[in-house]
Image (tube, rainbow, N blue to C red):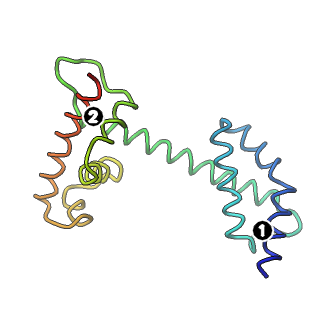
Amino acid sequence: MADRARERFTRVFADHHRAVLGYLLRRADEHDAEDALSETFLVVWRRLDAVPADDPLPWLIGVARNVLNNQRRSAVRREALRERVVAHAVPDRHDPAPARDGEVIAALRLLAERDREVLMLHAWEDLSAAQIAQVVGGTAAGARLRLHRARRRLAQALEEVTR
């Protein structure tokens, strides 16, 4: 059975990957289109039984469309996270220039995993201190303290990165 599935997948890929890639390239840059193509065919492999045998192209394009929409939603969430992190990590008052993406990422990398985790739970997942406490264990007051300290350390790390 596995050989038949592999053969079918190979045939679907060979017959349709260029058409799906063309669809994606008309809607996204090359890098995002290639990522979406890979994800699309991962879905095909996982759901091979759902792929119509007679004309799979419309189904494939539907999957590619969903994958591209998911990529875009993820990009919006990443940008919102970046904005929240920057908003919470106020740079030195004497430096009016806001931190750039690369600087924020570099500063986050300097932090301990515990600090990154609590910042991400708050900024990315939009969790309150009480909800963060449920995720990581502990009390809401403890989570508030961890978040406060993590923000302070992030601000310090941003200062180091921007020097």
Secondary structure under the numbered disc 1 in the rendered image: loop
| Other-residue count near label 2 (Cα within 10 Å), few / some / many at <14 / 14–19 / ≥20 | few
Query: In this image, 141 relative to 19: left or right?
Result: left
Q: How many marks?
A: 2
Residue on which disc 1 sits? 51
Name the amino acid, label 1: Val
Asked which quadrant contains residue 11, the reply is: bottom right
Please state, as top left, top right, bottom left or bottom right, where the N terminus lies in the image: bottom right
In this view, the residue farthest toward the bottom is: 1
Q: Residue at 67% of width from left, 61% of height from top?
A: 42
User: Residue 148 appears at what percent x and percent y?
Assistant: 15, 46
Asked which quadrant contains residue 101, the reply is: top left
Residue on which disc 2 sits? 87
User: Residue 72 appears at what percent x and percent y?
Assistant: 55, 44
Q: Residue at 10% of width from left, 58% of height from top?
A: 141
User: Is residue 135 depicted above or below 33 in this figure?
Assistant: below
| Other-residue count near label 1 (Cα within 10 Å), few / some / many at <14 / 14–19 / ≥20 | some
